[in-house]
Image (tube, helix red, strand yellow):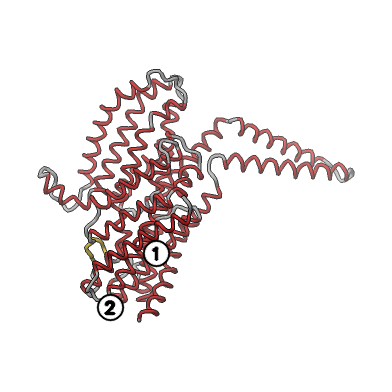
């Protein structure tokens, strides 16, 4: 599809959202601001789809478990389902307690400017990051937007720097935790299956266990994150569930364990049946992980839709609430139409602009196959569960991309230990470099021509060694991509904050 057509289709959706907001806000004071916020919210939702959702399906696409069309279809359906079926009905108007609501002095107009600026700033930053092929955190983008708008409205004193410190810590915690867990599971697969003499016998034993762990992790993850907004409804329907406001970790873990046991019993005979006739090649082992990857992509998308869409459209809900009641409150109801804008907008953005980042996550950082992708998806679920219990403010984007890094670096480390052909060639060239260096050191100034020749030979050999080293490293993890993505993570909050402050002052100057 041509870029111009994509832009037109995206604009049609945004205008439709704005038109509906105009219809909803008929008779409301300052309803034009609701139309503006709806336009910004629709644009934000599309950029979330273009950037953030790539983490849910990128590994499955990169490993060829899913085609890009199938991935977009699955993610679009389950993102929208997560948002509309299990999304939040109430959201904190000041995201994550970043700024004090009192900063706005009870002035709803000032609050509307700040929230509208936050939406547009986050959307613009996500758009730029997508263009740069850098998967960044939607949550951090909107955090930066709210931070910038809040500071512009009330100064630096209103910021909760303790909260911001936790967010900064998550830049390190999220990717490291995701990378370590993904590397651990890939190492298990390699050491317990691929490196065994009888791969099929090992797969028959190990694969059902891995599938059971994945089922347990995802059921725990979905219970904690995907069902927390509808837990009251579930407990009302199913009286045997604990009558709590949200699912406790113990309950989620029990669900996960039950799901894991059922999955193990279900998958064990099916794995044994599937490997009949296989030769034990790597491709055969990979095929055992194809269906689990498809389910993982769907479940991650559902959980993302349920958990993150409300955060993304929260400022739109906050604007709607402020204009309806002409006051600034710490909580705001999310009307159905706002969730529809968020859920459908994500699907539209994913379908129109998502392939760019899907390819980046799936194939442009490191080469993935089904085993590696399985480790990444499993790590994403487990890391969120662990982080939730530890109270760590982690980013699903940072976790997923960190897991991709972890898989790539593990491959690099293992292959260096095994002395592959490319590694052996590198070692041979290093020996030659050492020999030339020894000849150069032994050469005296009495033979300047010979010494000059040795210097040139040394430089040339050193250049070959550096080139081989770079090629060897780039084969596993593309360092340039790592540097670009990490840099984008670091600047996300301040960049979105600066853009938001600029938009806030612009809106205030125009309408005040």
Q: On residue 2, which mark appears?
A: none
Left or right: residue 387 compared with residue 487:
left
Q: Residue at x 25, y 60 (%)?
A: 337
* Residue at the disc numbered 1: 144
Q: Between tags 1 and 2, which lies in front?
A: 2
Q: Is residue 382 visible?
A: no
- Name the image quarter holding residue 325: bottom left
Left or right: residue 397 compared with residue 232:
right
Residue 285, given in percent of the width and then of the height, sits at: 42, 27
Residue 264, given in percent of the width and then of the height, sits at: 28, 29
Q: Residue at x 75, y 45 (%)?
A: 459
Query: What is the spatial separation of the Cα atoms under label 1 and label 2, in whole angstroms?
Result: 21 Å
205 is higher (above) or lower (below) than 412: above
Q: On residue 107, which mark appears?
A: 2
77 is higher (above) or lower (below) than 435: below
Which comes before the other along the chain, label 1 or label 2?
2
| Element assignment for label 1 | helix
Q: Is residue 260 visible?
A: yes
> Please, which residue is most extreme toward the left here?
239
- Graded by Cα atoms within 10 Å as few (under 14), some (14 to 19) or many (20 or more), the crowding at tag 2 reads some
- Graded by Cα atoms within 10 Å as few (under 14), some (14 to 19) or many (20 or more), the crowding at tag 1 reads many
Residue 207, given in percent of the width and then of the height, sits at: 36, 28
- Name the image quarter holding residue 183: top left
């Amino acid at each position: 599809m041509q870029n111009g057509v994509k832009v037109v289709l995206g604009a049609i959706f945004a205008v439709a959202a704005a038109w509906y907001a105009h219809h909803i806000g008929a008779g409301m004071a300052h309803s034009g601001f609701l139309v503006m916020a709806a336009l910004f919210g629709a644009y934000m939702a599309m950029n979330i789809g273009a950037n953030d959702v790539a983490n849910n399906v990128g590994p499955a696409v990169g490993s060829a478990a899913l085609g890009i069309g199938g991935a977009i279809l699955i993610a679009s359906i389950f993102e929208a389902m997560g948002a509309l079926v299990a999304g939040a009905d109430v959201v904190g108007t000041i995201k994550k307690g970043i700024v004090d609501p009192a900063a706005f002095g009870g002035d709803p107009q000032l609050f509307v400017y700040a929230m509208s600026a936050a939406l547009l700033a986050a959307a613009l930053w996500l758009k730029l990051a997508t263009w740069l092929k850098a998967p960044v955190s939607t949550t951090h983008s909107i955090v930066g937007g709210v931070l910038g708008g809040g500071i512009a409205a009330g100064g630096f004193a209103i910021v909760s720097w303790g909260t911001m410190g936790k967010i900064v810590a998550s830049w390190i915690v999220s990717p490291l935790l995701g990378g370590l867990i993904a590397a651990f599971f890939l190492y298990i697969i390699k050491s317990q299956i691929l490196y065994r003499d009888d791969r099929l016998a090992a797969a028959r034993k190990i694969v059902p266990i891995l599938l059971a762990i994945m089922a347990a992790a995802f059921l725990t993850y979905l219970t904690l994150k995907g069902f927390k907004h509808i837990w009251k409804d579930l407990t009302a329907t199913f009286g045997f569930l604990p009558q709590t406001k949200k699912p406790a970790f113990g309950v989620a873990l029990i669900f996960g364990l039950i799901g894991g046991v059922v999955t193990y019993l279900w998958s064990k005979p099916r794995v044994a049946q599937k490997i009949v006739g296989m030769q034990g090649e790597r491709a055969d082992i990979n095929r055992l992980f194809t269906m689990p990857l498809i389910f993982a992509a769907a479940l991650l998308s559902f959980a993302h839709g349920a958990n993150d869409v409300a955060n993304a459209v929260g400022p739109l809900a906050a604007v709607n609430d402020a204009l309806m009641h002409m006051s600034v409150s710490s909580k705001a109801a999310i009307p159905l139409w706002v969730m529809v804008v968020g859920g459908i907008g994500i699907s539209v953005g994913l379908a129109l602009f998502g392939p760019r980042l899907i390819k980046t996550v799936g194939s442009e950082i490191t080469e993935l196959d089904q085993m590696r992708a399985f480790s990444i998806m499993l790590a994403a679920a487990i890391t969120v569960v662990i982080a939730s219990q530890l109270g760590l403010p982690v980013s699903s984007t940072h976790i997923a991309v960190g897991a991709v890094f972890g898989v790539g670096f593990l491959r690099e480390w293992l292959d260096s230990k095994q002395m592959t052909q490319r590694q052996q060639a590198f070692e041979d060239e290093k020996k030659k470099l050492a020999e030339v260096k020894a000849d150069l050191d032994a050469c005296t100034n009495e033979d300047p021509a010979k010494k000059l020749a040795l210097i040139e030979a040394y430089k040339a050999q050193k250049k070959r060694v550096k080139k081989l080293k770079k090629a060897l490293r780039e084969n596993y993890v593309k360092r340039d991509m790592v540097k670009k993505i990490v840099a984008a993570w670091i600047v996300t909050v301040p960049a979105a904050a600066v853009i938001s402050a600029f938009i806030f002052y612009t809106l205030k100057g125009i309408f005040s």
